[in-house]
Image (cartoon, grey):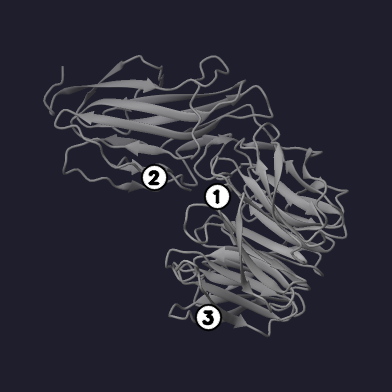
Amino acid sequence: MTQPVENVRSFLLRMTHRRLSTGRPGLLGGAVVGLGVLVFSMISPVNADVSTQTDWSGGAAENLTVDHWDRSFAVSEGVSWLAVPGQITLTGIALDPVPEHVVDDLFVRPSSLDPVDMDGDGDLDLVGAAIGGNRVRWWRNEGGQPPVWTDVPIESGFAGASSVRAGDIDGDGSVDVVGCGWVANEVVVWYNGGQGVAWTRQSVATEFGQCHWVDLADLDDDGDLDLLGAAAAADMVAVWINDGALPIAWTMQTIDDTYGGARSLVPADLDGDGDLDLLGTALEDDDLSWWRNDGGEPISWTRNIVTDSLAGSHHADAWDMDLDGDLDIVALGYGHPWLKLYWNEGGDPVSWRGEDIGDAVVTPLVLGAGDLDGDGDMDVAATADSWNRVMWWHNNGEPPAEWPATTVASQFPGPWPLAIADLDGDGALDVVSGASGGVEVAWWRLTDFVASGFLESRVLSIPDHVVTVECTVDARIPPMTGVSVLLRVGPSPDDLGDWFSIEPGRPLPVMVRGPAYLQYRVELGTSDASAAPVVQSIAFEWTSDLQTRSGASSRVQP
């Protein structure tokens, strides 16, 4: 029986779950859920507030819900939560040699790849361009371990197809594709008529000389996707603003038409002011620059030079490499023997501190970054054209003294495009590339998984008048793997009692006087190094003896 608030209260904790499979003894199965989130649902009196916890590193408890996978927990070991946002899985052990999986062996001189869920089935497909074969294709991921791929044509005969990106451009809920042709000098949008069986072609630009790069982003913050691109022969970087009408009308804005041998242009909020800036490379000028978005209609852009001595500047992108909350730049030059990392030092305008990373690389072309080994920091991968190699470099600390290299592929003729994504859905990032000196598109799984890992949350307070707490876990749990959740509850953050395992369908009374505090522990394990469980959501729901109602749900994003 529930006592008055000043007296002893009873908390009934019970675990609900849906069993997919069982692994090791004592580990629970879960349900397959497509979106990885951690959810705390608070059921409380009508006037109660729901606030946000963003730091799990420890300290006094607060009456907060959790909506953010922070970079630190109270304790964690052997788990990854940065590799694929909103998911917990086990960390990786680098494989050497790395197994290769072929997507297509008849795609002449692939030049661009973009991983995206084209059909909305929860796994990642691939969209690609072939500069030699003049083709734009979608490879549909049919599932399986490794996945089976189905080739879906988008356009054949697109002269010198050099770059593609996918996104919902017209806002109809289906994924469209934008591409450009090095020989055609054309920027084109293909609108998806549904399931990729019918495409409507729209020519956006027809004199964009030797178009090398296209991308998609909402540059004017109006809720729709705009286009951006780089043209080598025209020495030009430009954007096309989406007017939001149907059919879409595009307004071209030239950012720079003296950018010698422009090669790439990507969107990134480099100054942290909430809008998207532009980061570009120019091969002939050896230039790496960014243009600050100053707002206005049309948008005003201010150029800032990062360096004008990156030999053969070819590709750059921005990630938070040191996890300090701002974006750093990783870049490469076709004539520069090292990958370059430019640390964001802040200021107005932003200042940059450069350092070399990786071993010497012969003619690098395209790079990517992500937590490839699941150890909580950002690693780097790149293609080396004349070296016929795909490689990745392990980040071994802050700041790293060195970046140990692992060769992904050593006989891959002229690798050009590169992307990083979880193609097989195992919770770890993979690398995909195309052989521009051949006809092959392939991907590589870089790591196996450690046998076990865990994390513990920060101490969380439970609202007043709570009488029951219900925990639900959703996870993908392959055979020979498992997940368990433990709780401890007590009257103060320093007096939480012993950990106990939550079992399905078994009410567990916990006697606590006054305000109560909760901490949870998630344990993951595998006896198959090639597979790991993926925890996609943990939900806690409490009921009050004052009034029971549905409260707000918080979604976890890193």
Q: Position of residue 528 (x, y in %)?
A: 67, 24
Q: Which amino acid lies under the numbered mark 2 shown in the image of this protein? A: Asp
Whether residue 496 is visible:
no
Q: Mark 2 sits on what residue? A: 67
Looking at the image, is 348 positioned above or below residue 543?
below
Whichever of labels 3 and 2 marks the residue nearer the N terminus, that label is 2
Instruction: Please indicate whether residue 31 sits to the left or right of residue 527 in the image.
Output: left
Q: Amino acid at mark 3?
A: Trp
Question: In x, y percent, where is residue 546?
Answer: 14, 31
Earlier-in-chain disc, 1 versus 2: 2
Q: Secondary structure at mark 1?
A: loop
Q: Position of residue 245 (x, y in %)?
A: 45, 68
Nearest the eye: 104 or 90: 104
Asked if residue 97 is positioned above or below residue 19 in the image, the reply reads below
Measure the alpha-carbon separation of dots 3 and 2: 35 Å
In which image quadrant can residue 15 be found? top left
Residue hosting label 1: 194
Badge 2 crowding class, 10 Å Cα cut-off, few under 14, some 14 to 19, many 20 or more, is: many
Apparent side of residue 59 relative to residue 425 in the rendered image (left or right): left
Up the image or down, 237 lies above or below 382; here it is: below
Mark 1 Cα-neighbour bin, 10 Å: few <14, some 14–19, many ≥20? some
Task: Tell us which disc is closer to us: 3 or 1.
Answer: 1
Quarter of the view holding residue 25? top right
Residue 278: horizontal and vertical position, in percent?
Answer: 57, 72
